[in-house]
Image: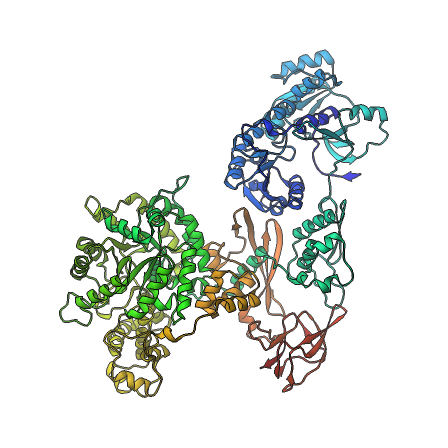
């Protein structure tokens, strides 16, 4: 016997038998050939327990599952049990959403669904749904549309039954079309009668009429209910049999005509024509009647509804409930799981599925270990003994659980309690308004310049660029624009939103600059996201426009020197992940560094765009260190070295129209076949004029940013360049209307980054950049720093000191990292109230910033004209100096050893991209991995939530991945507990969740046992919570690797903690009877 909440499929045994006809045919009549396509992904077009049962069966078969849900079902369990879940019927009433055939088919097609299971009720008996599946090339798990039509229509099914000689109660031959037809039937057969929905069951659309006065009201109610439930209000009328037994026979059939019956079940206990209790077999059923009812069946089986654990699974709970505290002093059993099946592999499959559905938060469990056991061939064959676990150590190679939702709640709670995780320079809040994405056409984006690159290679691409009629543009909005205006803080989340619009509407861009430079380390350091994932995701969304990155020559994307093979490997991996064009520069125009970067980019198969970093003024005869002749000679070397494109990198925006004409004109005359690309900043406000002058002098490409991200320390306005060249031979071919829409998105998106926006402290550009020559991005940063240090009123003095520091250092090319060196010296001078003359006079006694000292030692190369003397000698005295290219003497990096080390620290999920991140920024990558281990990936959060967290009572959605959407509501913040934590309460998918968050401010005033740091070899932590029974060593004692250090007692079991290395015990943090939590520091050992 089984208690059940649910609907019945049919009213009489006859209509259960019709299921035999339905299931005995498949969709082999479909115009599409689907029989031989393996089913890898199944959608269930239903809800609740019905869907969950199908999901569980699919999971045991290794089939990926897809749920659909209405707006009213966002918190329902069925959408969490599926691998993917998608909203359908937005704005529709609850039932209508599940009847929205076009939307269901659309979701299926968009997400590569192979087959749709209709469950029962809703669309399960709608032939138009089965036909829609067939027309869409999606398999319908059920009968063919024709069979559904015949048997889903109770009137036609009744006629078929009559032709087959199956006895039926009197009823109408077809659906009644008006009340008078029902009255005519009642006059013939008398009362009671029953109205039934012609196109559905489950008790919906059924009304019993016992006397004439009730006829009209019940007709209206039955019609309305059928229409709402099945999308069709058609009714038929039968003579109502009072007090019958409701016996159903379940039928199973295949497309080859094989049919079996699964015997009967008694569904007589009903309320409102819906089954409440089912009994199988039917008690006291005459055997001859049973034979008659099952005459069309072939074999024995039965189907029953099961409880929430699923078929073949039993749960015996122990201490598993929300808020439970698991004591280390007793058995830590949470729940006992019992699985049954026809054999061991079947039972193991059910157990595996059941374990995969568990969600246990707050404590570690043995579920991953048990899953390894259940997947082990020796276990499945039953050839095990008591040494099984000891002899199969791979069982302990535990796959880490993602636990993404709980980690995400922990992050949100952390921000709510402690504020933003990334430093905020000004007290401004992110805007509460999200940008609206402009309409994006369906289908693939138009072909762009990348198609030329992929087809013809870098050389052919360069020729196509040079032959192009009109001015080409590179869009810096995705990188340098936000580096200059928003401290490089724009997140992948907001770039991904607008990327498809760019792909469809800006396919004739030369390139999009979206990677390299400062964005690489900032992504990990401040945005807590992987820079490689940004590149991969943008490449998928923007496949038709070439991507361009900034490569700091021999420094790759770092601020230091790397072994040559590290630079080559970096470029190789970048190219594999979708990078196309490498803009290679050196902060001093030091040729050996430049050449190495060019060789690395070229060897990777990328387009090499060698850069001339521009400073000074070629149009000023009084400034001749960086003369026109200097730049032409440098260009000669770069062209001779094989660059595909020549770039002029004007990082401070110093090019004026006249100097633009002189420099670009001279380069064009000398290199008539070489594409020329010009980069500038608009700090002085002359950027548009300078770029138009470059175009007139022969430049092929200029850099721009979309209007709302242009101007000031960013690039010139895209809209202005497009408008000014329209109707001329420099026409860009870009629509101004598209520029307006693009700009509108970024205007609103920029408000999300208000805490980082340079306009918080800087209201305009300034032509004094022609004097101080501060690069655009650094200008913004210096402005922020001056204000944060209380020197905002002295920023003019900082800028003057920058110019003086530049002269002290010999008038440098100023771009990262040389610009930082000049900036550090300038701030040093302001903080210490030093003039240029005083610095020169006291150079041998002042403590200069490290960056200045290392520059003078030669750590970043040799500047044009050599080092400043006697300043250099006075600063360095007897300090060592680097001769030649700094990275040339570095030993090659061992990537295999680095990968092995990373896997030992972070597990086997390490990728080649992770290895390169660690090679470039070891400490930053380590901190990034620690962050993701604690909080998971947070790039799925919108920017306001990432920076500021949710407000109390705020409801929002987070898409973890396609088909995995969380519905979250922030509920409350708890009081501070004795452990320095606050409990933060959320509602997640309709269920209450809470997380404990350390209050970092409060904890500074409280004492806690220190934790062992995993990356410090000599720190020994507690492997589990427990009590110290015995400390076996003393401070100062020498120990060997593997020597016992102390004994812990936990869960009635004693554990010996052994030394992980040989060395000396320098400090012991515990004593006998100390109670420890997991990872609490026991002692420290030095090697």
Task: In the rendered view, tell whether residue 850 sits above or below residue 398.
Answer: below
Q: How is the image coloured?
A: rainbow
Q: In the picture, which quadrant includes the N terminus?
A: top right
Give the residue furthest to the left.
Answer: 621
Q: Is residue 666 visible?
A: yes
Q: Horizontally, is 587 left or right of 532 in the view? A: left
Task: In the rendered view, tell whether residue 1080 sits above or below residue 880.
Answer: above
Q: Residue at x 28, y 45 (%)?
A: 734
Q: Please give the count of numbered marks on the rendered protein.
A: 0
Residue 551, image x, y percentages: 35, 63
Q: Horizontally, is 425 left or right of 972 in the view? A: left
Q: Residue at x 16, y 57 (%)?
A: 669
Q: In the picture, which quadrant includes the C terminus?
A: bottom right
Residue 72, image x, y percentages: 58, 41
Q: Is residue 216 visible?
A: no
Residue 579, image x, y percentages: 39, 55
Q: Horizontally, is 772 left or right of 4 in the view? A: left
Most foreground residue, 939 or 576: 576
Q: Quadrant of residue 782?
A: bottom left
Task: In the rendered view, tell whether residue 847 sits above or below residue 498.
Answer: below
Residue 846, image x, y percentages: 33, 85
Most foreground residue, 826 or 269: 826
Q: Quadrant of residue 405?
A: bottom right
């Amino acid at each position: 016997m089984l208690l059940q909440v649910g609907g019945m499929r049919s009213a009489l045994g006859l209509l259960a038998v019709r299921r035999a006809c339905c299931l005995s045919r498949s969709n082999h009549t479909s115009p599409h050939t689907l029989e031989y396509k393996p089913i890898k992904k199944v959608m269930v077009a239903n809800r609740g327990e019905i869907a969950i049962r199908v999901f569980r069966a699919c999971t045991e078969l290794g089939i990926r599952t897809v749920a659909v849900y209405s707006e009213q079902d966002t918190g329902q369990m069925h959408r969490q049990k599926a691998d993917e879940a998608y909203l359908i019927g937005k704005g529709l009433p609850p039932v209508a959403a599940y009847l929205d055939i076009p939307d269901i088919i659309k979701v299926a097609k968009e997400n590569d669904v192979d087959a749709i299971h209709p469950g029962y009720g809703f669309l399960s008996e709608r032939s138009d749904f089965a036909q829609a599946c067939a027309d869409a090339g999606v398999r319908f798990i059920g009968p063919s549309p024709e069979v559904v039509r015949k048997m889903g229509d109770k009137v036609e099914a009744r006629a078929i039954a009559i032709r087959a000689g199956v006895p039926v109660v009197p009823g109408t031959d077809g659906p009644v079309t008006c009340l008078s037809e029902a009255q005519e039937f009642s006059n013939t057969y008398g009362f009671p009668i029953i109205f039934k929905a012609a196109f559905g069951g489950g008790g919906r659309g059924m009304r019993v009429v016992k006397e004439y006065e009730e006829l009209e009201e019940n007709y209206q109610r039955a019609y309305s209910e059928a229409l709402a439930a099945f999308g069709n209000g058609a009714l038929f009328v039968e003579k109502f049999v009072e007090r019958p037994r409701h016996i159903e026979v379940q039928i199973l059939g295949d497309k080859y005509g094989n049919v079996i019956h699964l015997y009967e079940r008694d569904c007589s206990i009903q309320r409102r024509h819906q089954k409440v209790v089912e009994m199988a077999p039917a008690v006291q059923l005459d055997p001859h009647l049973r034979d008659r009812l099952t005459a069309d069946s072939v074999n024995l089986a039965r189907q029953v509804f099961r409880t929430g654990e699923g078929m073949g699974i039993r749960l015996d709970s122990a201490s598993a409930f929300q808020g439970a505290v698991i004591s280390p002093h007793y058995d830590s059993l949470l729940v006992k799981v019992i699985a049954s099946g026809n054999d061991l592999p079947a039972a193991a499959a059910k157990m595996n599925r059941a374990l995969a559905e568990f969600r246990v938060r707050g404590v570690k469990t043995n579920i991953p270990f048990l899953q390894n056991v259940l997947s082990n061939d020796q276990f499945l064959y039953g050839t095990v003994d008591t040494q099984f676990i000891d002899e199969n150590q791979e069982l302990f190679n535990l796959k880490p659980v993602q636990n993404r939702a709980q980690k995400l709640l922990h992050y949100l709670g952390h921000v709510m309690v402690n504020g933003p995780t990334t430093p905020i320079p000004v007290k401004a809040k992110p805007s509460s308004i999200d940008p609206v994405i402009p309409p994006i056409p369906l289908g693939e984006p138009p072909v762009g310049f990348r198609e030329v690159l992929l087809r013809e290679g870098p050389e052919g691409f360069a020729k196509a660029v040079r032959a192009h009629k009109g001015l080409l543009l590179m869009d810096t909005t995705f990188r340098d624009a936000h580096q200059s205006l928003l401290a490089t803080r724009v997140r992948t989340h907001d770039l991904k939103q607008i990327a498809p619009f760019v792909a469809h509407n800006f396919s004739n861009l030369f390139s999009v600059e979206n990677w390299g430079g400062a964005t690489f380390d900032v992504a990990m350091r401040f945005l807590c996201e992987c820079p490689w994932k940004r590149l991969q995701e943008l490449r998928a969304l923007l496949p038709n426009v070439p991507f361009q990155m900034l490569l700091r020559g021999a420094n790759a994307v770092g601020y230091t020197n790397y072994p040559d093979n590290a630079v080559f490997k970096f470029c190789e991996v970048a190219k594999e992940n979708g990078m196309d064009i490498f803009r290679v520069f050196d902060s001093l125009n030091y040729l050996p560094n430049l050449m190495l970067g060019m060789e690395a980019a070229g060897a990777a198969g990328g387009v090499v765009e060698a850069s001339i970093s521009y400073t000074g003024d070629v149009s000023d005869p009084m400034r001749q260190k960086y003369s026109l002749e200097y730049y032409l000679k440098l260009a000669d070397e770069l062209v001779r070295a094989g660059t595909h494109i020549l770039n002029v990198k004007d990082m401070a925006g110093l090019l004026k129209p006249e100097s633009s004409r002189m420099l670009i004109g001279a380069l064009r005359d000398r290199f008539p076949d070489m594409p020329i690309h010009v980069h500038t900043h608009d700090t002085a406000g002359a950027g548009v004029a300078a770029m138009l002058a470059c175009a007139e002098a022969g430049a092929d490409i200029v850099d721009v940013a979309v209007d709302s991200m242009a101007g000031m320390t960013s690039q010139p306005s895209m809209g202005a360049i497009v408008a000014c060249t329209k109707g001329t031979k420099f026409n860009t071919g870009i629509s101004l209307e598209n520029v307006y829409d693009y700009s509108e998105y970024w205007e609103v998106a920029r408000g999300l980054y208000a805490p980082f926006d340079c306009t918080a402290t800087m209201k305009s550009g300034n032509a004094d950049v022609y004097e101080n020559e501060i690069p655009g991005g650094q200008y913004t940063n210096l402005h922020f720093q001056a204000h944060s240090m209380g020197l905002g009123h002295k920023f003019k003095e900082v800028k003057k000191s920058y110019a003086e520091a530049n002269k002290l250092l010999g008038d440098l090319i100023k771009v990262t990292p040389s610009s930082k060196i000049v900036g550090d010296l300038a701030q040093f001078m302001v903080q210490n109230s030093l003039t240029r003359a005083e610095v020169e006079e006291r150079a041998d006694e002042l403590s200069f910033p490290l960056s200045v000292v290392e520059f003078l030692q030669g750590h970043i190369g040799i500047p044009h004209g050599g080092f400043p003397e006697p300043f250099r000698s006075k600063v360095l005295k007897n300090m060592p100096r680097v001769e030649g290219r700094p990275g040339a003497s570095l030993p090659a990096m061992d990537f295999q050893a680095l990968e092995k080390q990373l896997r030992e620290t972070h597990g086997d999920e390490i990728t080649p991209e992770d290895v390169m991140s660690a090679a470039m920024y070891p400490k930053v990558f380590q901190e990034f991995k620690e962050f993701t281990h604690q909080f998971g990936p947070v790039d799925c959060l919108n920017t306001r939530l990432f920076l500021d967290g949710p407000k109390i009572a705020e409801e929002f959605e987070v898409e973890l991945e396609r088909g995995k959407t969380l519905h979250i509501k922030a509920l409350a913040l708890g009081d501070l507990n004795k452990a320095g934590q606050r409990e933060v309460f959320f509602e997640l998918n309709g269920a209450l969740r809470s997380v404990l968050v350390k209050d970092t401010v409060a904890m500074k005033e409280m004492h806690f046992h220190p934790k062992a740091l995993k990356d410090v070899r000599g720190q020994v932590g507690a492997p589990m919570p427990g009590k110290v029974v015995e400390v076996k060593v003393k401070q100062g004692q020498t120990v060997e690797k593997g020597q016992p250090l102390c004994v812990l007692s936990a869960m009635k079991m004693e554990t010996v903690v052994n030394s992980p290395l040989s060395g000396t015990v320098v400090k012991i943090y515990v004593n006998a009877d100390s109670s420890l939590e997991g990872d609490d520091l026991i002692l420290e050992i030095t090697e």
